[in-house]
Amino acid sequence: MHDMHDEQVSRRAFATSAVGTVVALGAASGLTQACARLPTAASMQPPPPLPESRRVELSGADFSTWRDIDHLARLAPTPHNTQPYRIRPLDPRTADIVALGERFLPEEDHGNRYVASAFGILSSAIEMAARTLGVQVTTTPASSVDVAGLHRAAAPTTLGRVTVVGVTEPSRDASLLDVRRTSRIPYHDRIVEPEIWRGLQGIAATYGHRLLEYHDRDVVDATLRLNVDALIDNLGLHREREEIRHWYRTGPTPPFGDGLWEKPLNQRAIEIKTAFGSPGFFRLPVIRPIATHQYLKTQRGTRHVALLCGRFTTWPDLVGAGRALFDVWIEMARHGVYMHPMGSMLTNSVYATEIARRFGVTDCWLAMRVGYSDAPPRAPRLASILL
């Protein structure tokens, strides 16, 4: 029998050794082979500027309402923070929502379903932003969309129309669009009150979806560990890895931008660079348990995992799912509750099958950890999504 203290010291020494190996990789002469070169704030190229005539038009008094809506709606979340949608004002009362195919993730997001569902998220964000201004708008999705082909479009694809229909009493919810953030930092080891869960589940139900909550510690811990396994194994999928590499960034988080930055991710640059530059490293038998342990430390205090389940196939399904997620997330923000989507398990068919088996569901489309935490670092957004 080993003394428990001795076992802890041994594990600590082993972890230190493994981290030291990663650092050594970064310091070695083979850095360019072992670590990926990823974008930094200094190296990022901003989106192509609008033509001067269009910039002048959008800056005019006729489009002031759209500028105000844009300032808040641009905070809407999107997969990997790719921000693939733009608001294209046509006149003071009408705007189209268009998709930029080059910002989709077809290798990882099979069939473009998750990025397409973000149209529903943005639609709800636009309507919420308008209400804070005392403006009532309606968002009407296109009747038919080739979701699976959206990434192949050479020009922006119109997916819906926003129409100003009147005025309303201004809401006081503007701050919630910023308070609502993904929290990848440790949580406070505190249960979310049952009445809050009932409210969140009621919101999901209005869209025909089910929000399933689990707080048994064994279930929570096993699910978090499964997610780490999915993250590590997905690094071995070459096409998916190379697609998302473009969206990972290292260095200080800029005030405006897109993609996944190291501080909001709660990961160190050396870990991110090694993941993309030498993806097999974390799958080595001696390294994998240490990498798992290190990642799970960032998720300590998690008391809940939850699943969103429902129809997630057709264009109308996806729009509704996005709206359901947005409303649930905003309600969480209202109560100071955060969540961290764990999409890696559901974009990989092997892990999606395992989630279905463990939880007895066949229509789960989002897994997440949920709880209270300190305010997490803000992920950047583009300065404007007007087109």
Image (spheres, helix red, strand yellow):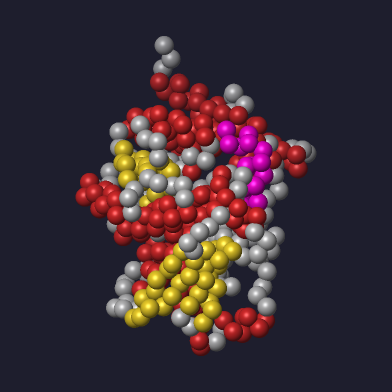
Question: Could you tell me residue 225's position as x and y percent?
Answer: 45, 32
The N terminus is located in which quarter?
A: top left
308 and 19: which is toward the camera: 308
The magenta segment: 233-251
In which image quadrant can residue 30 be found? top right
Q: Is residue 48 magenta?
A: no
310 and 295: which is toward the camera: 310
Left or right: residue 41 versus residue 264 is right
Q: Residue at x 60, y 53 (%)?
A: 149
62 and 36: which is toward the camera: 62
Question: Could you tell me residue 233's position as x and y percent?
Answer: 57, 33
Q: Residue at x 49, y 38 (%)?
A: 345
Reply above or below: 67 against 120. below
Reply above or below: 87 against 251. below
The C terminus is located in which quarter?
A: bottom right
265 and 19: which is toward the camera: 265
Q: Residue at x 31, y 41 (%)?
A: 213
Question: Could you tell me residue 165's position as x and y percent?
Answer: 38, 78
Question: Could you tell me residue 158's position as x and y percent?
Answer: 55, 66
Q: Is residue 346 visible?
A: yes
